[in-house]
Image (spheres, helix red, strand yellow):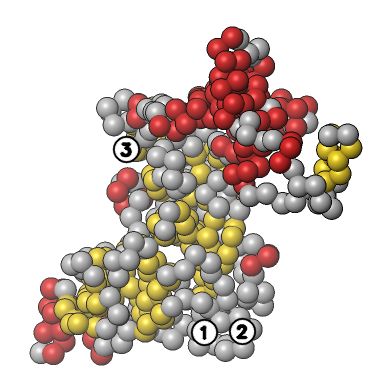
């Protein structure tokens, strides 16, 4: 995890404001982190230039310039002072200001320059130096060769590669990850276990992963792990916090994290984590601080979320967040979030007595057809995939029946106002329909 740039700026300019322990911790971090060291060195050199400029003794040219400045502001004639003025007292041609009348900003600046010509020259040098820095910004260090852009999984070893195909680091993830790398990173109904993305907007990708469902090894299914671009652990996060617990009476055994994603809203990234209870039908959606992993807000839902997507459906520059899955109404649902903070409990078939209602913008239930009722042995019919359609629409796939061989589904096409435009069926749906019809 990197140190905030404001802290680095303050430490470079005024290290005496930090305690001994804080200074030692910052120094240790700067010795290990090239990114923060580069920012610190930039501020340190800048402040050092300021201090040297202020301490510089004025030479002959500085004095000549000060004289010129003084001449420009020397039009002040004591003889022109008003003889009757309550704020000025005159004694033997000498005057004393008893009460200073307020001046405008320009007059105050001119008065200060006249009284402090040498300081004015020094500060003008500093101002010019700052102006030059703003006009000719130093280009940041290129971290392309350190930035992971691809992941591979070989015999439980997770490997990170840069854009040139060079191996950056590898990590043993036995018990956490196994199988095809694309399926592990997918957001469909099988659940996501791995993500490679820039979660904090610093143009360096982080790696997020969670443990296996059966809690084997060092990685646990109720914990989300974030690794920095260099492979070091940034934080570990749980999906639920007592502070934002809007469903305290829910039964819980153990949370199993099955989705996480990053959405862009305005100039910041929002990190979402989704988990369901191991034995019960409860589900929690939380937003996390990308820097620390701390929970910032939460929303509860009775039923499992099995699909997620972040799409700017109304083309306003902010991505909407879509969650779909199995509801307590035994119907597929789509939940739409277009805000930064979550709260409350979504509609629940079993109980309507929650004090705080879920603040999602839309909660849409899809129908269950007679074919699904005939094929399915359970009532767990839900959304299996959410994807973008054209420029301003989405496709929601309602999975009515699934086994290892066939996937019977309907596809609902919605516009940006979430009106259904039309419905299509997968080939397997049509095949099963014709077979049962006969």
Q: Position of residue 397 (x, y in %)?
A: 26, 73
Q: Which residue is mark 2?
A: 354
Q: Secondary structure at mark 2?
A: loop
In the image, 334 versus 94, the foreground residue is 94
Residue at position x 70%, y 30% in the image: 115
**Quarter-wise, where is residue 132 in the image?**
top left
In the image, 434 versus 364, the foreground residue is 364
Q: Position of residue 225 (x, y in %)?
A: 52, 46
Q: Secondary structure at mark 3?
A: strand
Q: Which residue is mark 3?
A: 150
Residue at position x 65%, y 25% in the image: 117
Cα gap from disc 2 to disc 1, whole angstroms: 9 Å
Of the two numbered discs 2 and 1 in the rendering, the one whose residue sits closer to the viewer: 2
Q: Earlier in the sequence, mark 3 or mark 2?
A: 3
Q: Secondary structure at mark 1?
A: loop
| Mark 2 touches mark 1? (CB < 8 Å) | yes
Q: Position of residue 78 (x, y in %)?
A: 74, 36
Q: Which mark is residue 348?
A: 1
- Residue 182's place in the image compared with 259, above or below, is above
Q: Relative to 118, is 153 on the left or the right?
A: left
Q: Relative to 370, is 136 on the left or the right?
A: right
**Quarter-wise, where is residue 252 in the image?**
bottom right
Inspect this view and state whether residue 403 appears: no
Cα gap from disc 3 to disc 2, whole angstroms: 44 Å
Residue at position x 23%, y 86% in the image: 371
Query: In what quadrant of the picture does the C terminus appear?
Result: bottom left
Q: Mark 2: give few (<14), some (14-19) or many (20+) Cα within 10 Å.
A: some
């Amino acid at each position: 995890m990197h140190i905030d740039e404001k802290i680095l700026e303050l430490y470079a300019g005024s290290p005496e404001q930090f305690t001994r322990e804080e200074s030692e911790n910052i120094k240790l971090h700067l010795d290990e982190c090239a990114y923060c060291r580069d920012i610190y060195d930039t501020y340190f050199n800048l402040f050092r230039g300021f201090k040297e400029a202020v301490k510089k003794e004025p030479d002959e040219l500085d004095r000549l310039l000060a004289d010129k400045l003084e001449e420009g502001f020397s039009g002040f004639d004591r003889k022109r002072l008003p003889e009757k003025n309550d704020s000025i007292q005159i004694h033997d041609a000498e005057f004393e200001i008893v009460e200073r009348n307020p001046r405008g900003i320009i007059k105050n600046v001119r008065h200060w320059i006249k009284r402090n010509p040498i300081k004015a020259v020094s500060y003008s040098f500093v101002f010019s130096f700052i102006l030059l820095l703003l006009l000719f910004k130093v280009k940041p260090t290129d971290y392309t060769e350190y930035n992971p852009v691809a992941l591979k999984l070989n015999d439980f070893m997770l490997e990170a590669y840069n854009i040139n195909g060079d191996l950056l680091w590898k990590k043993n993830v036995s018990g956490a990850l196994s199988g095809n790398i694309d399926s592990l990173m997918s957001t469909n109904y099988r659940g996501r276990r791995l993500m490679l993305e820039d979660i904090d907007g610093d143009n360096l990708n982080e790696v997020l992963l969670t443990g296996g469902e059966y809690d084997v090894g060092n990685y646990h299914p109720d914990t989300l792990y974030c690794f920095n671009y260099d492979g070091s652990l940034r934080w570990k996060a749980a999906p639920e916090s007592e502070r934002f617990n809007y469903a305290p009476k829910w039964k819980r055994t153990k949370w199993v994290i099955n989705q996480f994603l990053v959405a862009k809203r305005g100039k910041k990234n929002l990190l979402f984590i989704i988990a369901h209870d191991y034995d019960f039908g409860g589900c929690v959606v939380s937003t996390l601080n990308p820097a620390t992993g701390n929970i910032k807000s939460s929303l509860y839902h009775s039923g499992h979320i099995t699909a997620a997507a972040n799409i700017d459906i109304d083309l306003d520059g902010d991505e909407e967040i879509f969650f779909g899955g199995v509801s307590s109404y035994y119907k597929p649902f789509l939940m739409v979030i277009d805000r930064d903070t979550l709260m409350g409990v979504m509609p629940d078939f079993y109980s309507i007595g929650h004090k705080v209602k879920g603040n999602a913008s839309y909660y849409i239930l899809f129908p269950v057809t007679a074919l699904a009722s005939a094929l399915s042995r359970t009532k767990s019919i839900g959304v299996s995939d959410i994807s973008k359609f054209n420029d301003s629409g989405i496709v929601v796939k309602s999975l009515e029946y699934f086994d290892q061989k066939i996937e019977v589904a309907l596809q609902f096409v919605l516009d940006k106002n979430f009106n259904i435009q039309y419905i299509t069926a997968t080939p397997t749906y049509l095949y099963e329909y014709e077979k049962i019809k006969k």
